[in-house]
Image (cartoon, rainbow, N blue to C red):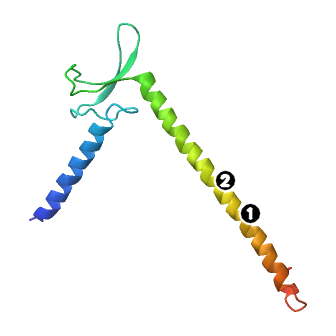
């Protein structure tokens, strides 16, 4: 017999995951439709490609997102992520440079005939 609390927690987690799916349904490349159906790549009569639900109906419950827009959103998000990582790296490099300077200063303070042999 399983704990009913555990079943409730699992159901709440599934609901939260589903809300996340619905919230970001028309943002970036969709992974699953809000109706639960799989996403496939389709092309209309004009040659425009879409990510859409396998059971797409124009009733507002299914996803149909232009490929170009979805890929553009993905690239923009990746650019922001790369910029954040570059900024973080520059900050770390500055901190390392300051630490090296502090270490060199400490070495200068500690220099004495007895200790010089330790730092060579």
| Foreground of the two, 58 or 47 | 58
Which quadrant holds residue 94? bottom right
| Left or right, residue 109 beside residue 58 | right
| Foreground of the two, 56 or 81 | 81
Up/down of 76 relative to 97, above or below:
above
Q: Quadrant of the C terminus?
A: bottom right
| Foreground of the two, 79 or 9 | 79
Residue 53, x across and y down, in percent: 27, 26
Which quadrant holds residue 23? top left
Res. 14 mark: none
Q: Residue furthest left?
A: 1
Q: Residue furthest bottom?
A: 114
> What secondary structure is found at the residue carrying circle 2?
helix
| Left or right, residue 1 beside residue 27 | left
| Left or right, residue 82 beside residue 43 | right
> What secondary structure is found at the residue carrying circle 1?
helix
Q: Give neighbour class at mark 1: few <14, some 14-19, many 20+ (Cα, 10 Å).
A: few
Res. 97 mark: 1
Residue 95, x across and y down, in percent: 68, 63
Q: Which residue is mark 2?
A: 90
Which quadrant holds residue 8? bottom left
What residue appears at the point 23 percent right and 31 percent down from the top-left corner? 37
Q: Quadrant of the N terminus?
A: bottom left
What residue appears at the point 14 percent right and 63 percent down from the top-left corner? 5
Residue 46, x across and y down, in percent: 39, 7
Number of numbered discs on residues: 2
CA separation in Å, label 2 and label 1: 11 Å
Q: Give neighbour class at mark 2: few <14, some 14-19, many 20+ (Cα, 10 Å).
A: few
What residue appears at the point 82 percent right and 85 percent down from the top-left corner? 110
Going from the N terminus, do you reach mark 2 or mark 1 first?
Answer: 2
Residue 20, x across and y down, in percent: 29, 43
């Amino acid at each position: 017999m399983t704990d009913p609390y555990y079943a409730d927690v699992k159901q709440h987690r599934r609901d939260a995951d589903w809300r996340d799916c619905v919230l970001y349904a028309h943002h970036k490349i969709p992974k699953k439709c809000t109706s639960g159906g799989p996403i496939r790549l389709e092309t209309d009569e004009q040659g425009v490609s879409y990510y859409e639900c396998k059971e797409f109906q124009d009733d507002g419950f299914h996803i149909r997102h232009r490929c170009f827009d979805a890929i553009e959103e993905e690239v923009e998000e990746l650019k922001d992520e790369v910029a954040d990582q570059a900024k973080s790296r520059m900050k770390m490099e500055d901190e390392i440079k300051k630490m090296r300077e502090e270490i060199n200063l400490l070495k200068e303070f500690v220099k004495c005939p007895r200790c010089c042999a330790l730092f060579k």
